Each structure stands twice: as structure tokens, then as C-alpha cells.
Amino acid sequence: MPQQPSDGSYDWLYDGQPSTSPRRAAPAPPSQLPPPDLPPPGRRASTPPSGGGPRRRRRWWIRVPLLLVVLWLVFLVAVPFWALRTTSRVEVAPGGDRPADQPGTTYLVVGSDSRAGLTPEEQAQLATGGDEGGNGRTDTIMLLHVGDGPALLLSVPRDSLVDVPGYGTTKINAAYAYGGPSLLAQTIEQNTGLRVDDYLEIGFGGLVKLVDAVGGVEICPAEPISDPDAGIDLAAGCQEADGATALGYSRSRHTYATQDIQRVQAQREVMGSLAGKLKQPSSVLNPFRYVAINQGGAASLTIGEDVSVLDLVRFARGLSSAMGGDGLSCTVPLRDFSVRWDPERSAQMFELVAADRTGDIGDLCTADGLPATS
């Protein structure tokens, strides 16, 4: 066996072959080692910063705003879904032969004379009188069509004489009294050829609460209005109205020469102003107002079985557009002040709406339903 060299390295393996491993250098004696890197006398050695300390702090300050944004988005989504779960729903699907599916979405909007939720004192304050039992009647009937063309808000005067299935020719608001939302929707479909896709109903008390929830709406009566039956005494000109005033303004008709024809225009004005308030940033950015609006809407509305949150958002946007100048605000084409429909002009309008061609309606759309004057 080869002898171990005196310097501690091996030149030969045990099998007698040369070794290719480098030789290890002998360790230097302690006297030749460099001095340790010590701090000057009187100073303590600094501790090197932790590898993730500052980075962790920077990430924390990034995460806090992101977490707040996520929580805010969850809040914005959760509140309307929660409110929708508490909203009253009603079966609206009309009976009989229905129009086929049509492009766009047509909402049937009803303002009923229901006093539900109002105390006797509130009924006296709002000059509504007491409930008459049954389904009641509808002070407001509107159709809102939203599609590829301009949004259309179309008032149907409540005294319009139409054929109510099973009851013959009578005022259209009697359909609601006889058979509720379903018969009213069926009457609308059979007399217009328009398919009712969604249904929204608001009672007297609901309108008051919803208007108050948004902080009031703007109304602009052209003439002074003093109507004890509606509980209002208004000066002419634009002014802010609370819920009680907005309700009275949308109900008043006896002070107008054209009665219901003028009233439907006031109703569209209130609805459009309400939709405009709902679109304001403060209605979303102010959490207290946002919750109040959703609570007010949930307590105020009765909706069809299939109406979703997205349907309500689309409705509010369409309503605001129709009353904001980008869309159309009309009354069903009328023959005269007796609120009988003009058979030719109304048929033309209904055909255009059914085809989602609201951009072609032109002068068929007038505020009072009467032919446009040249």
C-alpha cells in the first residue's frame, strides 16, 4: 500500500492509480489570519435589515386600499340583491294568445291607488282617502321600451276606452280592478300587439318613500296649481318636491283643462326626475343614501316574478334616457281630448315599437298624444 505523504494529501488511491483530486492546502496558523471585522470601540454592530421587512410593509399599504375597494364592490352588489329578496312579487303572465317574442324589452309600469303601508293619519296628510278594497285601480299606466333605438316612455291614459278581455269595452284601468296585473297586461298586449316582458308597480305610499329616499325630485309646473283633492298648492316654475308633493303633483288633474292628458305628462316628469336622481353619483357613493334607496325601493315596489336586479338597472337607465333628451317621452296617439286612441297613428307607433324601431317614430310621439301641429 502506498505511503501517506507527510503533507496530508494523497497521490495514490488504494488501487494504486494516480489521484486526480486537488491537494488541500494546509490551514494557515492563527497568527496569519486577517483580523475580524469589528466595529470601532464604543459602537455596537448594526443588525442587517431583515430580507422581507420593508417589502412586507409596502405590500401591506397596497393591500389595505385593495381590500377596501373589494369590500365596497361587495357592498354595492350585496345591498340590491338583499333588497330584491324583500321586494313583493306578483304573477303577471297574461292569459290567452300572446304576441311572439320581440326585440328589446318592454316594461309595464303601473302606479296603483293602493294605500298599503299608509296609516290613517298619513292618508289624511296626503289626501289619498282610504283603500276601497279589491285590487284598486291604476292612476298611472306606462310602457317603457328599451332596445337598440332610443328609449321610449309611453303614457296610456287611465280613461282610455279599450276592449278588456271578458268585460267588453271599458276604461283600461278597470282591467286592473277586475283582474289585477295579469288582466291589465293581457289587455295591453291584445290592444297594442306589444309583448309585456317585465312588470313594475308602485303604490301611493311607495312613491312618497322612494322620492324622499333620493332627497326629493324637481318638478316644473307651467302654471300655479292649487288642488285640495291632491293636497298641493304649488307656484309655477321649477322647484324641489318632497315625496308628498310629488305624489300630489302626479295625481292632480281637476285643475287642468285637459285633465288626464295633462296629468300623464306630470307623471312622466316625476318618474323621469326620480330616475335622474337615482343615476347621480351621490346615490351610489353615499352608503347611507344607497341603503335608503334600496330599502325604499324594496318597500315601495311590486315586481313580476322574473324581474332581476339587472332588469331594474336597465329600467332605471332607460327611464332616465327617455326623459333626459336622448329618448322619447310620449302619450299614446289620441284622436281627441276624449282620450280615444287614434286607430291609424297608434297602430303605426305600436308596430314600430314591436320591431324595436323607435328611432323611426318621429312626430307620432307627442307629449299629449294629439297630432303635432305644423
Image: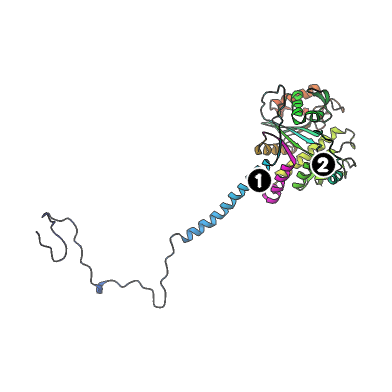
> In the structure shown, which secondary structural element does the residue marked by tag 1 occupy?
helix
Q: Which residue is mark 2?
A: 247
Q: Which residues are magenta?
A: 281-306
> Where residue 88 appears, x then y in whole percent?
71, 38
Q: Is residue 132 visible?
A: yes
C-alpha gap between disc 2 and disc 1: 27 Å
The C terminus is located in which quarter?
top right
- The way the protein has been coloured in the rendering is rainbow
Closer to the camera: disc 2 or disc 1?
A: 1
Residue 349 in view? no
The answer to whether residue 323 is left or right of residue 12 is right
Q: In the image shown, does 60 or 122 lie closer to the viewer?
A: 122
Residue at figure coordinates x 25%, y 74% from the top left: 31
Residue 95's disc is none
Q: Is residue 286 magenta?
A: yes
- Find out whether the residues at labels 2 and 1 contact each other: C-beta distance under 8 Å: no
Q: Main secondary structure of the magenta part?
A: helix
| Image location of residue 290, percent across then percent down | 69, 48
Badge 1 amino acid:
Val
Please name the amino acid that badge 2 sits on: Leu
Q: Secondary structure at mark 2?
A: helix
Which numbered disc covers residue 79? 1
Where on the picture, by quarter, is residue 361?
Answer: top right
